[in-house]
Image (tube, rainbow, N blue to C red):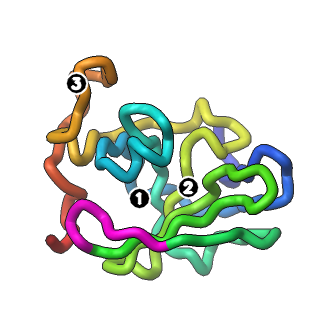
Amino acid sequence: MAGPWTGGCACGAIRYETSAEPVFQNLCQCLDCQKRSGAGHGSWLTFPRRADMAITGEASTWRVAADNGNEKLHAFCPTCGTPVHLAFSFMPDMIAVPAASLDDPGRFRPQAVTFGVRAHAWDRLDPTLPKYERMPDSPG
């Protein structure tokens, strides 16, 4: 499906849209993604420039140290609690959105598994995906 990438929170208070293409789509098994998703991994699409993504609505945020020690800024809807985007201190221009927040989650095409060293036997992912112990090309 061509066209912009659109999505938002469950209650509709926060929406996003970009015509940029994601530079990376991954399944992340870091401890933070596991806790945040309530599952064995998070599913993310990373876009090259936050400035190219229109976001409406006010998100609440919280900061957390990533597995590699770098800081991440999580944004979520203060009304329904849905995670809506994520920023990284070591890649300040980029922005990631959870695959499940897309209006059409079927567009998500994971390219790799990151932090696969934290995998659980019960979280079965596509065995053909490349696996990385950290984010490719990230410091730390």
Task: Pick whichever of labels 1 and 3 is earlier in the sequence.
Answer: 1
The residue wearing badge 2 is 97
Location of residue 23 in the rendering, given as x and y in whole percent from the top left corner: 41, 58
In space, the residues marked 3 and 2 are separated at their CA atoms by 23 Å
Can you say whether 107 is above or below 77 in the image?
A: above
Which residue is nearer to you in this view: 114 or 46? 114
Q: Amino acid at mark 1?
A: Val
The residue wearing badge 1 is 23
Task: Pick whichever of labels 3 and 2 is earlier in the sequence.
Answer: 2
Q: Amino acid at mark 3?
A: Thr
The residue wearing badge 3 is 128
Would you say the residues marked 2 and 1 are in contact, meaning their CB atoms lie under 8 Å apart?
no
Residue located at (40% from left, 48% from top): 33
Would you say the residues marked 1 and 3 are in contact, meaning their CB atoms lie under 8 Å apart?
no
| Secondary structure category for the residue under label 1 | loop
User: Which corner quadrant of the image does residue 103 belong to?
Assistant: top right
Which residue is nearer to you in this view: 132 or 80? 80
Task: Pick whichever of labels 2 and 1 is earlier in the sequence.
Answer: 1
Can you say whether 122 is above or below 52 in the image?
A: above
Residue span colored magenta: 63-69
Q: Amino acid at mark 2?
A: Val
In space, the residues marked 1 and 3 are separated at their CA atoms by 20 Å
